[in-house]
């Protein structure tokens, strides 16, 4: 190879571009002649006229003559670097006139995406337009593909000039193209390992190591890329070293695990109708003794040939383990006359061996386990009719026929083969009077006779006559009258049910007056049940991922075990209904949440099911537990709709309970202790969810349920939050959101964190304190974001402890980092609950119309609640009234005066809520 700077290499580069040799320019020739003839040392030799003539010719020489001269004054240098290092090449040229663009070439080909910079410096003196152009090519990380000859190229005067080439070479430690991989091999079985490396510089020699000890046979001057190992008897590690002039590089270490060889000579030793004994010869296991062998047996059927060659059977096999030695096993409790397939694998401390091929075996036939049923023998003259039915017990084979035996008192026994018939007529000798004639029957298979039936005596024939059908004696109008009465009853019952249904669903059963033992009760009535389809077919029709499908198999419930009752709540996207789950030994009352799949996308369906699987892992007394998931068929869409099964909560959702306590037909007083207990329960449940890194995104009183113990359970983790769509708002094409409960940063950026759930918890506390009032009355959903950005917040509810409201205000801090965690909220609420005095039964609540009772009531702000009242004059105050709570229907709730409760014990600072001063 010629040197990078040789003239031959430069000419070859120019020839590859089809360029002529660069000509000698006229201006350069003029300069040389001037210095040679008119220089100071030579002035005495040449006449002055020649010098002046030469100067005049230079002035009138054409400007384009400089294009005939090679403009490059500096060419790229040869560089050598290691892989990954940075490299730089530089070329320099001097031109007259407009500076040209410099193009970089590698091996004669232009670099389109070269990282090059070009600097232009003017050199003009005495009015000359001369430029110095410097171009630098930068290679940020040298790779093998960057090696080659580099040149600069410019176009001047329609001609192309290239610089002398510079070579970029790479040298460094060897680089692995392929390294040995982990694998498992059978003991004493040959295998190969591969390792490939390259330079430059070359050559690269490979050295193999086994258990960190070099293998001398693998060291040679040529690359030993494949190592042939004749076999191992223990687990070993292999690696390779690559050597070149720059040093050594070591590959990753591959672990070769030695497993036992596949057992062989699997054969049948003996067989019985219900037992099979098989034996086998174990394979070599190296230095690791076998610990046990595993045998699998599956039932064979007509389609066994389809899967016989596959590694796994189509159904769950029966698996047995046998201690070794001896290497045989007896399989019991099998079915007679049944084909099976059997395979064996043996295990050592390193792992199991491969399975043997499937061995087809079959249990032999057995005799029937029971006698024929209902044997009877009747005499009619000189003949006897004997009848029987097939045995109920298993036949243990193919029924070939029946044998009949009969004998008299003084006559020998007669044995007959009847075949497959189940009745026979016996001809009796003489007049047919055979004393003490008895008959018995037995079924038989290829294995022999089954047990005989008990002897049946011969009985006389008694013909049975059918009584005549009685004549119909009712007059026809009796039938007509009965039909009219039945139709009238059905019509009256239907009208009653429709009327009752309208009454139940008018307010979603919130104001239903039915109360048992002072508690809200929901009656159950079955309405329909699901159709039956296999779980696997249902999951395959959903089009969801295999990972989610595998998780759903653990939470799936058979649909035919679920029956639906009346609807508890229904919205645009789904409904909540009563349900009944039939378990193995009991019937469980549940709440069933359905989803109208026709208006949901596939991604929403997958999110729905993913959250259902997540709920299955929840285990906390204040978090709703998922019982299971099933699917309801959809005729319109062609794929099933998901149904979530949850525990039935006797007292319904918390918001309805609070609202019922104020506005129901029979108001119920809720003491402050109970309200704080509700808040603490929700905080405890949300603390559990936050530790599980689960974000609720829809925390509100309507999504909290009350069980029979009056404990609150957090529910609706996105599974059914679209059911109650009255409190949601859609802006543009954004999904519906509960804007009056959602955090301000979530409204702006749709970013949800545990701290955004804390904001929602503060609004939920306000709901509880106001006993079910709607937040921000008078403010439209579309105006909430601007309202909050102005610094407005919910006001302190009437009768609310100052400490509780301070805790709410901290939940509504503008910066999420300033809000407390659910752990801190739970601790503070539990301290408040302990500090409160025991709850006492209050005086009777009085409802009165206050339209004329208060002359100038303070208007409610948009945030709800009233401003803290000013201190009244003692002589004008009424000792029996403390506050008036305004409701939309103009009604007020008047409560007896109570002593002020303690404030919330807390160590954190509780700044006043933002916006309180401006009427929010």
Image (cartoon, grey):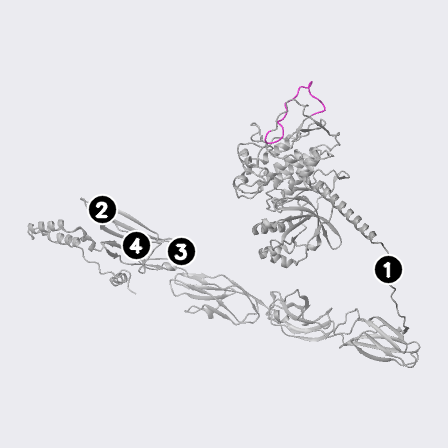
Q: Earlier in the sequence, mark 2 or mark 1?
A: 2
CA gap, disc 3 and disc 1? 110 Å
In this picture, is 774 found above or below 391? above
**Front-most of residues 670 and 660:** 660
Check disc 1: other Cα within 10 Å, few if <14, some if 14-19, many if 20+. few
Q: Which of the marked residues, 3 or 1, is nearer the chain's N terminus? A: 3
Q: SS for tag 3? A: loop
Q: Which of the numbered marks, if any, corresponds to residue 84?
A: 3
Which of the labelled discs sits on residue 103, or is there none?
4
Graded by Cα atoms within 10 Å as few (under 14), some (14 to 19) or many (20 or more), the crowding at tag 4 reads: some
Of helix, strand and loop, which one carries label 1?
loop
- Tell me which residue sits at (58%, 48%) in the image: 599
Distance of mark 2 from mark 1, alpha carbons?
136 Å
Could you tell me how far apart the alpha carbons at marks 4 and 3 are, in whole angstroms?
24 Å
Side of 634 relative to 89 (left or right):
right
**SS for dot 2:** loop
Q: Is residue 51 visible?
A: yes
Residue 876 among magenta residues: yes
Contact (CB < 8 A) between labels 2 and 1? no
Q: Which residue is mark 1?
A: 471
Q: Is residue 121 positioned above or below 893 on the image?
A: below
Image quarter of the C terminus:
top right
Q: Residue furthest top?
A: 875
Say few, some or many: other residues with alpha carbon within 10 Å of mark 2 (under 14 / 14 to 19 / 20 or more): few
**Residue 89 percent location from the top left of the image:** 32, 54
Per the image, the residue denoted by label 2 is: 123
């Amino acid at each position: 190879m010629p040197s990078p700077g040789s003239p031959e290499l430069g000419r070859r580069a120019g020839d590859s571009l089809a360029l002529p040799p660069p000509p000698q320019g006229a201006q350069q020739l003029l300069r040389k002649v001037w210095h040679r003839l008119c220089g100071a040392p030579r002035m005495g030799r040449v006449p002055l006229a020649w010098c002046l003539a030469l100067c005049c010719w230079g002035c009138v020489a054409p400007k384009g003559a400089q294009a005939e001269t090679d403009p490059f004054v500096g060419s790229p240098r040869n560089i050598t670097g290691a892989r990954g290092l940075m490299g730089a090449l530089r070329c320099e040229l001097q031109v007259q006139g407009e500076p040209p663009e410099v193009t970089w070439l590698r091996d004669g080909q232009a670099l389109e995406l070269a990282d090059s910079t070009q600097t232009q410096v003017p050199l003009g003196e005495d009015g000359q337009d001369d430029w110095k152009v410097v171009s630098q090519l930068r290679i940020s990380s040298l790779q093998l593909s960057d090696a080659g000859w580099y040149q600069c190229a410019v176009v001047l005067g329609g001609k192309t000039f290239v610089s002398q080439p510079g070579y970029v070479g790479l040298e460094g430690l060897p680089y692995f193209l392929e390294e040995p991989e982990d694998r498992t091999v059978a003991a004493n079985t040959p295998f190969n390992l591969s390792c490939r490396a390259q330079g430059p510089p070359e050559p690269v020699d490979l050295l193999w190591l086994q258990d960190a000890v070099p293998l001398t046979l693998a060291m040679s001057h040529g690359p030993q890329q494949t190592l042939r190992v004749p076999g191992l008897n223990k687990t070993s590690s292999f690696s390779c070293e690559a050597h070149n002039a720059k040093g050594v590089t070591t590959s990753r270490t591959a672990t070769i695990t030695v497993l036992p060889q596949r057992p062989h000579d699997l054969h049948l030793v003996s067989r019985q109708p219900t037992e099979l004994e098989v034996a086998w010869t174990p394979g070599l296991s190296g230095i690791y003794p076998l610990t046990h062998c595993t045998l699998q047996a599956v039932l064979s059927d007509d389609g066994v040939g389809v899967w016989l060659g596959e590694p796994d059977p189509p159904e769950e096999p029966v698996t047995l383990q046998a201690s070794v030695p001896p290497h045989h096993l007896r399989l019991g409790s099998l079915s007679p006359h049944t084909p099976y397939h059997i395979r064996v694998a043996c295990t050592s401390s390193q792992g199991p061996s491969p399975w043997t091929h499937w061995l087809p075996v079959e249990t032999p036939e057995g005799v029937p386990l029971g006698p024929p049923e209902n044997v009877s023998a009747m005499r009619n003259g000189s003949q006897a009719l004997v009848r029987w039915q097939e045995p109920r017990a298993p036949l243990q084979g193919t029924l070939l026929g029946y044998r009949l035996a009969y004998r008299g008192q003084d006559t020998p026994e007669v044995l007959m083969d009847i075949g497959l018939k189940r009745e026979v007529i016996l001809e009796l000798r003489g007049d047919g009077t055979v004393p003490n004639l008895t008959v018995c029957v037995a079924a038989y298979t290829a294995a022999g006779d089954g047990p005989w039936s008990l002897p049946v005596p011969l009985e006389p024939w008694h013909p049975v006559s059918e009584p005549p059908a009685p004549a119909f004696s009712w007059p026809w109008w009796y039938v007509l009258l009965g039909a009219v009465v039945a139709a009238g009853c059905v019509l009256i019952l239907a009208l009653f049910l429709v009327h009752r249904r309208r009454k139940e669903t008018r307010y979603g059963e919130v104001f239903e007056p039915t109360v048992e033992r002072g508690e809200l009760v929901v009656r159950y009535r079955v309405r329909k049940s699901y159709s039956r389809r296999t779980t696997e077919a249902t999951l395959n029709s959903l089009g969801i991922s295999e990972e989610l499908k595998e998780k759903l198999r653990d939470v799936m419930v058979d649909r035919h075990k679920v029956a639906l009752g009346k609807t508890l709540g229904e919205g645009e996207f789904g409904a909540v209904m009563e349900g009944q789950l039939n378990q193995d030994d009991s019937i469980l009352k549940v709440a069933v949440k359905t989803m109208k799949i026709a208006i949901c996308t596939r991604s929403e369906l997958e999110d729905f099911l993913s959250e259902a699987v997540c709920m299955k892992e929840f285990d906390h007394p204040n978090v709703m537990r998922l019982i299971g998931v099933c699917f309801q068929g959809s005729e319109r869409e062609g794929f099933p709709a998901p149904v979530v099964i949850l525990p039935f909560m006797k007292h319904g959702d918390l918001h309805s309970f609070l609202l019922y306590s104020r506005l129901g037909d029979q108001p119920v007083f809720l003491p402050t202790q109970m309200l704080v207990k509700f808040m603490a329960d929700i905080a405890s449940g949300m603390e559990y969810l936050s530790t599980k890194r689960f974000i609720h995104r829809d925390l509100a009183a309507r999504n909290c349920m009350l069980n029979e113990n009056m404990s609150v359970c957090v529910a609706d983790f996105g599974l059914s939050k679209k059911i109650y769509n009255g409190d949601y708002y859609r802006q543009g094409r954004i999904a519906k959101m509960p804007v009056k409960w959602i955090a301000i940063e979530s409204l702006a950026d749709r970013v949800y964190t545990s701290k955004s759930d804390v904001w929602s918890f503060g609004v939920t506390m306000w709901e509880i304190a106001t006993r079910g009032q709607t937040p921000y009355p008078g403010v439209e959903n579309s105006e909430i974001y601007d309202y909050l950005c102005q610094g407005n917040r919910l006001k302190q509810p009437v009768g609310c402890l100052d400490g509780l409201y301070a805790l709410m205000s901290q939940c509504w801090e503008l910066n999420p980092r300033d809000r407390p965690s659910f752990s801190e909220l739970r601790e503070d609420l539990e301290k408040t609950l302990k500090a409160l005095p025991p709850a006492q039964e209050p005086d009777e609540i009085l409802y009165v119309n206050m339209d004329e009772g208060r002359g100038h009531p303070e208007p409610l702000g948009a945030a709800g609640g009233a401003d803290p009242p000013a201190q009244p004059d003692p002589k004008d105050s009424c000792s029996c009234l403390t506050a008036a709570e305004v409701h939309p229907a103009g009604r007020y709730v008047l409560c007896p005066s109570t002593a002020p409760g303690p404030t919330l014990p807390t160590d954190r600072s509780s700044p006043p809520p933002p916006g309180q001063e401006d009427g929010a």
